[in-house]
Image (cartoon, helix red, strand yellow):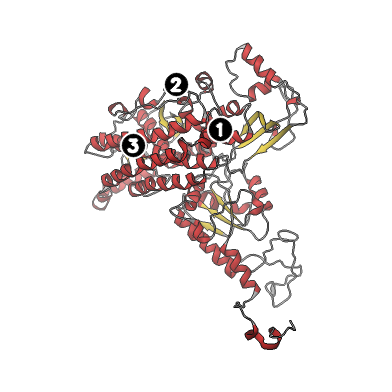
Amino acid sequence: MGADGSPAAQTFEGRQEMTSAALTSAVAKLRESGAVMRMTEEASQQVQETFDGDPTGDERMIMNMGPQHPSTHGVLRLMLELEGETVLRVKPVIGYLHTGMEWTGEELTYLQGPTNVTRMDYASPIFNELVFCLTVEKLLGVEVPERATWIRMLMAELNRMASHLLFMATNGMDLGAVSMMLYGWREREEVLRFFEMVTGLRMNHNYIRCGGVAADLPDGWRDHVLRLLDMIPPRLDEYDTLMTGQPIWRDRLQGVGAITAEECVALGVTGPILRSTGYAWDLRRDDPYLAYDEVDFDVVVGTYGDCFDRYAIRLNEIRESIRIVRQVLDKMPKGDYRVQDRKVTPPPRARIDESMEALIHHFKIFTEGFKVPEGEAYCAVESPRGELGCYIVSDGSSHPYRMHIRAPSFVNLQSLPHMMHGGLIADGVAVISSVDPIMGEVDR
Amino acid sequence: MAKEGGLLDEGLEGLNHNFLTGQLENLIKWARYRSVFPATFGLACCAIEMMAAGGPHYDLARFGMEVFRASPRQADLMIVAGRVSQKMAPVLRQIYDQMVEPKWVISMGVCASSGGMFNNYALVQGVDQVVPVDVYAPGCPPGPETLMHAIMTLHEKIKDGELTKRRGAGKGAGLVIEQRDGQTGGGRGLEQPVLLSRS
């Protein structure tokens, strides 16, 4: 018997399995249904009554979904208790992609850190690098050159576009709009082409480094971005034609998976899910980092907190990102792309051929890394999925003593049981899709 | 057959339509490598690149491979796209076992091939510890071009390889072929029935 009175499942995965409602205590059921942290007595009574149907009815069944399932965005596994087609309980089982990245991050030096964290949220790698570097820079007390800041903003906003385009593609496919899959990838490819030109890689760039960025923008970058900015908006209008106004699309999404702002806050949900409830919380505006206080943009909010609002918010956030990128193009300053602090920055490649000291410096910084003063720091950025935070404790050595990532996908996933409760199983797919979880970030 | 003007009376000239002759084996191989259906087995970053390869720009449909089957029972090829954790490994093996013969595996990316940069407690250090791998695609993540190269390498392998694949007694197709001297297992002094290993 488990601590809450329910029998432990006899599998190697132990208590992760879902037991039937008849065998599960009210406390465990409440915990599974999410949003239980600060529930009033009335609310908890209501939740208990919801489950009080006939727990042994003919239509009741426990179903497993995933971890290898095309609409779970990777390796998410859900245990569902169904009454016919209605979802009563949902239990996300995670860990199928646990990579031990926080542990690996403590083994790598600060210089190697971005290589590791960029592989967490692989749909928006730039944000991972950004938040890691911002935290390390906070510990170091390094002032990043202005041009580096603006390059970071440019890359971050383009990455937000790429990530949301990926969402458009997968969300369309999950709901049966398969042509959307092709369109979304087509546009994303255009953004990735720019990334490849700048960073040399399509994904997992390791472009943002502590103290700046890895390389300056190449010749012709401005024309490339301008071409991108002219190409994408008409295609977003195509999406509107294809999906936004379409009755099937609206029927599938409107009113599905609704959540309120209070529930979001109680569960720690951030990003488009929180904004879809009408709560205008965007770290770019509410806790400006980089130079977001110098650009003009709107925080897109929804009204009903349903899947349609989340879709519409992401679509319009692409438009806002385009607006920001245009301003970045106008304001991009000249100057250094990384800080000229020899402690943090390796010498330029050309110097290594001329100077023995530069060679030694290069060797030392890449083998030993640089030391970071003792202390702890937390920084957060607004990733396409919500508040992406990085917490680093330094013991004064060249490795983090502890590196923790506050992954928005992980926290947002908590809202799944709550949003899927009482809905149909077909709507469950729409809800999973609208949370847009990236399992690499959930499990790390 | 005995009808007037049939094959027996006039040979090939007696036919009023065209046809090709060839070895059955070649025909089967041709059919197999022209439409390999991959199972959707996306794990991590590489899955995004795998989907990109199926997208409009890279267009896996050119190789007859755009149909990613959701059910492993309908798939011929498992592209292990991403890092395989200790928790995922049994699931992966189960899905592999559910696929029907003939089946192939591409290990996509360094994490699947060797653990990559994550040499730690959580990851299986190479998916070939769990399932037999036919082609390894390097890269972190491999671009769609690399994946396509891996796929074409696999096509060559299917085209030139043996027709049936056996991986152990009673496994796979359940066929056991005894080898005699002069055949593959010959000269090695093996007394037990030798199973054809994959090239």
Is residue B191 among what the camera can see? yes
Of B55 and A253, nearer the camera is: A253
First along the sequence among labels 3 and 2: 2
**Drawn side of residue B103 relative to residue A282, left or right:** right
The residue that appears at 39% across and 36% down in the rendered structure is A318
Q: Secondary structure at mark 2?
A: loop
Q: Given the image, on which type of amino acid does mark 1 rest?
A: Val
Could you confirm whether marks 2 and 1 are on the same chain? yes
Q: What chain does badge 1 belong to?
A: A
**Residue position for label 1:** A431
> Where, quadrant-wise, is the C terminus of chain B in this rendering?
bottom right
Quickly name the residue at label 3. Answer: A322
Q: Quadrant of the N terminus of chain B?
A: bottom right
From the image, tell me which residue sits under label 2: A279
Chain assignment, label 2:
A
Q: CA distance from mark 2 to mark 1?
A: 19 Å
Q: Is residue B90 left or right of residue A103?
A: right
Q: Position of residue A363 (x, y in %)?
A: 34, 47
Element at badge 1?
helix
Q: Is disc 3 placed on a helix, strand or loop?
A: helix
